[in-house]
Amino acid sequence: MPPAGRELEVQVLGAAQSASPAVRRSALDRLFTGGCVLGDGAMATMLLDRGASIDTCCEELNLRQPEAIAAVHAAYLQAGAEIIETNTFGANAYRLERCGLRSKVREINLAAVRIARHCVIRAAGAQIAGAIGPLGMRIQPHGEVSCIAARSAFADQVHALAEGGPGVGADLLILETMMSVAEATEAIAAARDAAPWLRLVVMMTVDENGDCLDGSSAQRAAARLTDLGADAIGCNCSYGPTSVLRAIERMRAATPLPLAAMPNAGMPFSVEGRSNYPISPVEMAAFARSCLQAGVTLIGGCCGTTPDHIRAIKSVLQESAPQESG
């Protein structure tokens, strides 16, 4: 990655200087031992707000405009995020093929980790999650992609995200917006085979009623993901905070694992050709309070959320955190 500009350096340094003692303890330590950790928010909608074309392959920007990706990471770190996700949601062979970039799976994922690593190096305690989204293709028996091919595609992405091992590759993996338990099954298997040392957070996406898009209940999905060996499970994107919270409350009854909740900012609506999201930072803070009551340990945002939303969640976490001496 090219050297970051002075403004970016100041932002990242500011995030490090404002880090609390709890942040300086590893976010991963707290996430998997009962603490609460703050994730980041949206990447793609932030890039669009900052001038990217709607037709842009956001993952390709890891190669063409790394400074744009770094600026978004820095904004979230400055807002208080303790875990930032790589810009790799769609960086699998099937999605990249639509942009003529199938041959660049490894290159794009490696670049994304490198950009994120540059940003967290001065943000004490911050961690990098390798983001893995769905393939964008249905797998058999409901689609054309075989389970073997799906697992292979996920494995290629995991290998690249993990390359270099601890301190170089990703610090954990987040499988997100999984639309079916069957696809999540292949993604988990690929992650366990390709990078067994990495902790694995798996998040489903749900409908307005809090059920997974393949018809599975949130409880059934939670039980299955637990059996498959996820380290934490949860729900992201969906129809906004209400549907995510509904799913999380049902998952809690079906698993002892840590829970993750990262909703979008509601369903977008168009104003003069521009997408707007209805959920405000104040409303996201109220969601965070409900998450804490439900036992969630990783809270962040998805589409339409911004550093202001993450900053609002941080204020709630600070209110609820036990005071530390020293």
Image: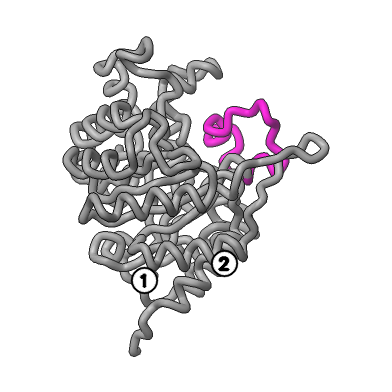
For the residue labelled by badge 1, is the local secondary structure a helix, a strand or a loop? helix
Left or right: where 59 falls relative to 278 = left
- Tell me, yes or no, if residue 222 can be seen here: yes
Q: Mark 2 packing: few (<14 Cα in 10 Å), some, or many (20+)?
A: many
* Outermost bottom residue: 325
Front-most of residues 86 and 147: 147
Q: Which mark is residue 312?
A: 2
* Outermost top residue: 144
Residue linked to disc 1 = 24
Front-most of residues 244 and 72: 244
Q: Is residue 65 magenta?
A: yes
Residue type pointed to by label 2:
Ala
Q: Residue at x 34, y 18 (%)?
A: 139
Quadrant where the C terminus is found in the figure: bottom left
Q: Residue at x 47, y 22 (%)?
A: 95
Residue type pointed to by label 1:
Arg
* Residue 252 pos. (x, y %): 29, 55
| Image quadrant in which you'd find residue 78 | bottom right
Front-most of residues 276 and 157: 276
Magenta stretch bounds: 46-67
- Tell me, yes or no, if residue 169 can be seen here: no
* Residue 45 pos. (x, y %): 62, 42
Q: Residue at x 26, y 18 (%)?
A: 147
